[in-house]
Amino acid sequence: MVAAAGSRPTISRFDPSRFRWSGVDPIPYKARNEGPLAWRGVERFVLVGAAGEQTAFQLRYFEIAPGGYSSLERHRHAHAVLVVRGRGRVRVGDATHRVGPMDFVFIPPEVPHQFRAGRERFGFLCPVDAARDRPRPVRLRRAGARRRGRSRPEQGARGR
């Protein structure tokens, strides 16, 4: 009897010269690279959880090319991120932080986030639940947008 692919132990050897694992090919970061979920220079690698393995999670490695960035998004699920290559910046909510190798970032549910590479390749591991919600874009408000965005009844009530 042949075991299913997801029920066999697997060892994917790491090649530090390429910063890649054997047998793990890049897959598209997102289907489209335009609109509110735009991104640039991001590769995604699923180390476990996408080939029928018996897990309730995926372990993913993302790598962002110099000058690249992930989409600015939010989810109902949390993120736990471990930086393993290069230096970059992470936006979490309204704050931006510089991060480097072995820095850990926790992003609570519904908090907007985005990763940006600096002058070097920037890579991080990110485990997530296998069943999760899709990313939702974050709409940025310009300064003063709140005032302009009031509904007419509010403006009328203020003037009385």
Image (cartoon, helix red, strand yellow):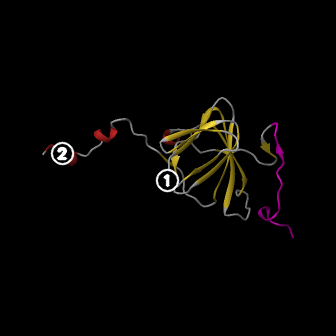
Residue 120 falls inside the magenta stretch: no
Where is residue 160? Give x, y as percent. Answer: 12, 46
Where is residue 19? Give x, y as percent. Answer: 77, 40
What range of the chain is rendered magenta?
A: 1-17
Alpha carbon distance from label 2 to label 1: 32 Å
Where residue 30 sits, quadrant-wise, is: top right
Where is residue 103? Give x, y as percent. Answer: 66, 44
The three-letter code of the residue at mark 2 reads Arg
Is disc 1 surrounded by few (<14), some (14 to 19) or many (20+) residues within 10 Å?
some
Residue tagged 2 = 158
Q: Are marks 2 and 1 in contact (CB under 8 Å)?
A: no
Q: Residue at x 67, y 60 (%)?
A: 57
Relative horizontal placement of residue 36, taking residue 65 as reference (left or right): left
Q: For this rendering, which residue is in front, 150 or 6?
A: 150
Q: Residue at x 81, y 40 (%)?
A: 16
Q: Is residue 144 above or below residue 28?
A: above
